[in-house]
Amino acid sequence: LVFDRGVLDGAAYWPDGCEAFFESVCGDAGSARERYDAVVFLESAARGGLAIHAGNVARTEQLREAARLDALLHDLWSPHPEFLFVGHTPEFETKVENALVILRALVAAG
């Protein structure tokens, strides 16, 4: 199964902070990470200062907040032993293709 989001993502958006999220939802970050065989992390264009709202009604954060959330999510997921990072690119399609290369390799490895 491939998920667009994982349980740890909720911690970044939890109104009372990450620790309150873990206490309320999943115990701790390590246990939550163990649910996943691999993490393919797509860095937000906001980290590169690139526009993030063009045609995307799902984006509610301003650039600075989006970059902060991306950094927090990176910190939450990066301790996973199979953390695979896809950096932002000026063209979204390039980032998607880079992610697909990683996903294809993961599927092929079984």
Image (tube, rainbow, N blue to C red):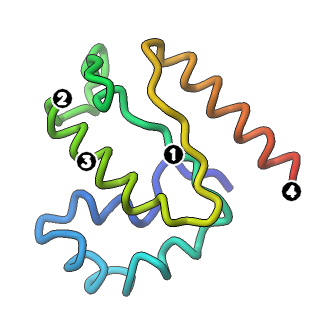
Disc 3 and disc 1 in contact, CB within 8 angstroms: no
Give the percent coordinates (x, y) of residue 83.
Answer: 58, 55
Residue type of the residue flagged with mark 3 = Leu
Question: Counting residues from the N terminus, which is met first, the one under dot 4 or under dot 1?
Answer: 1
Question: What is the number of the mark on residue 63?
Answer: 2
Residue type of the residue flagged with mark 1 = Phe
Residue behind mark 3 = 69
Instruction: Judge whether 67 appears above or below 36 on screen.
Output: above
Tell me: 92 left or right of 52: right
Residue plotted at (37% across, 58% down): 75
Residue behind mark 4 = 110
Secondary structure at numbered mark 2: helix
Disc 2 and disc 1 in contact, CB within 8 angstroms: no
Residue plotted at (87% across, 52% down): 109
Instruction: Judge whether 45 appears above or below 6 on screen.
Output: above
Label 4 vs label 3: CA separation? 31 Å
